[in-house]
Image (cartoon, helix red, strand yellow):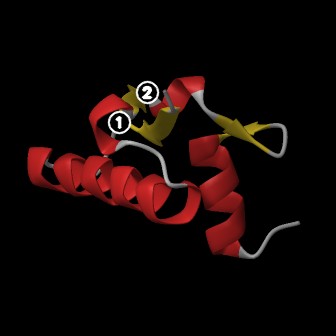
Amino acid sequence: MPYVNIKITREGGTTAEQKAELIDGVTTLLARVLNKNPATTVVVIDEVDPDNWGIGGLPVKAFRHRQNSGEK
């Protein structure tokens, strides 16, 4: 039984329809590539507050600001 955990930041208004598309797409991919049974494939989407997400040693908001401003 495959278990897939997708983590995204809780911002930008991810819709229920987008989440359903992700769940379907991941399930279909596992069935096609690994011949996994879609009926027993579990997909969980966790939405994480951006304050609890870090990249490159920085909170995600600071990381994005640095990327957008061209800082190193």
Please state if 46 lies on the left or on the right of 69 as rendered: left
Counting from the top left corner in percent of width and height, residue 56 is at: 83, 46
Q: Quadrant of residue 41?
A: top left
Please state if 30 lies on the left or on the right of 68 as rendered: left
Counting from the top left corner in percent of width and height, residue 13 is at: 20, 48
Is 18 rendered above or below residue 69?
above
Mark 2 packing: few (<14 Cα in 10 Å), some, or many (20+)? few
Who is closer to the viewer here, 27 or 7? 27
The residue labelled by disc 1 is 10
The residue under label 2 is which amino acid type?
Asp
Query: Residue at 45% across / 28% down in the picture?
Result: 48
**Secondary element at tag 2:** loop
Mark 1 packing: few (<14 Cα in 10 Å), some, or many (20+)? few
Counting from the top left corner in percent of width and height, residue 38 is at: 32, 43
Is 34 rendered above or below residue 70?
above
Can you see residue 14? no
Q: What is the C-alpha distance between the residues marked 1 and 2?
A: 5 Å
The residue under label 1 is which amino acid type?
Arg
